[in-house]
Image: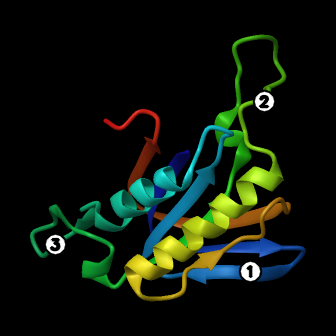
Amino acid sequence: MRAVIQRVSRASCTVTGNITGQIQIGLLVLLGIEDADTGEDVAWLAQKMVNMRIFSDENHLMNKALADVNGNVLLISQFTLFAQTKKGNRPSFIRAAKPDKAIPLYEQMVKELEKLLNKKIATGIFGADMKIDLLNDGPVTIVMDTKEKE
């Protein structure tokens, strides 16, 4: 499971002209799921995202976590995070999980984040052509992969 996590002042997702999710201060998370991913990956990544201290304190140091700033999450499915670009000019997405595997794990991530934050999170629509608008704060952008826990 791979995530691109961006600290944002605001973010929204629009599908066919309709806003499906929007947040103010918080995290925009682009989430890629591969065939090897399990519920353990969901639990580990959700914990890391919620508890990661990447929000500024009163001294402008990154010492606060999402809950400390009453932040929100906009979670977007993003199979292209598993693009393989070694050969040719057309990326291969063979490592990305097919919808029958990816959708349940995506939905599990939504539930896990809502449980940890004790609030609803905003989402896009799995598999849709989504338009994402965001104001990156910092910018702070972190890439995490559950297979490379560094």
| As drawn, 122 above or below 42 | below
Q: Position of residue 46 (x, y in %)?
A: 43, 62
Whether residue 81 is visible here, answered yes or no, is yes
Q: CA distance from mark 1 to mark 2?
A: 28 Å
Of callouts 1 and 2, the N-terminal one: 1
Contact check, label 1 and label 3, Cβ < 8 Å: no
Amino acid of disc 1: Thr
Of tags 3 and 2, the one toward the viewer is 2
Q: Quadrant of the C terminus?
A: top left
Find numbered disc 1 in the image and state the secondary structure of the residue it sits on: strand
Q: Callout 2 environment at 10 Å: few (<14), some (14 to 19), or many (20+)?
A: few
Q: Quadrant of the N terminus?
A: top right
Find numbered disc 3 in the image and state the secondary structure of the residue it sits on: loop
View extreme (top): residue: 87
Left or right, 46 with reference to 11? left
Q: Callout 1 environment at 10 Å: few (<14), some (14 to 19), or many (20+)?
A: some
Find residue 32 and name its label. none
Find residue 20 and name its label. 1
Residue appearing at x 81%, y 54% in the figure: 100
Q: Quickly name the residue at label 2.
A: 94
Q: Quickly name the residue at label 3.
A: 57
Q: Callout 3 environment at 10 Å: few (<14), some (14 to 19), or many (20+)?
A: some
Q: CA distance from mark 1 to mark 3?
A: 31 Å
Q: Position of residue 92 (x, y in %)?
A: 80, 26
Q: Position of residue 108 (x, y in %)?
A: 59, 67
Left or right, 73 with reference to 130? left
Residue appearing at x 49%, y 72% in the figure: 112
Tag count in the figure?
3
| As drawn, 135 above or below 70 | above
| As drawn, 110 above or below 83 | below
Contact check, label 3 and label 2, Cβ < 8 Å: no
Q: Position of residue 55 (x, y in %)?
A: 27, 67
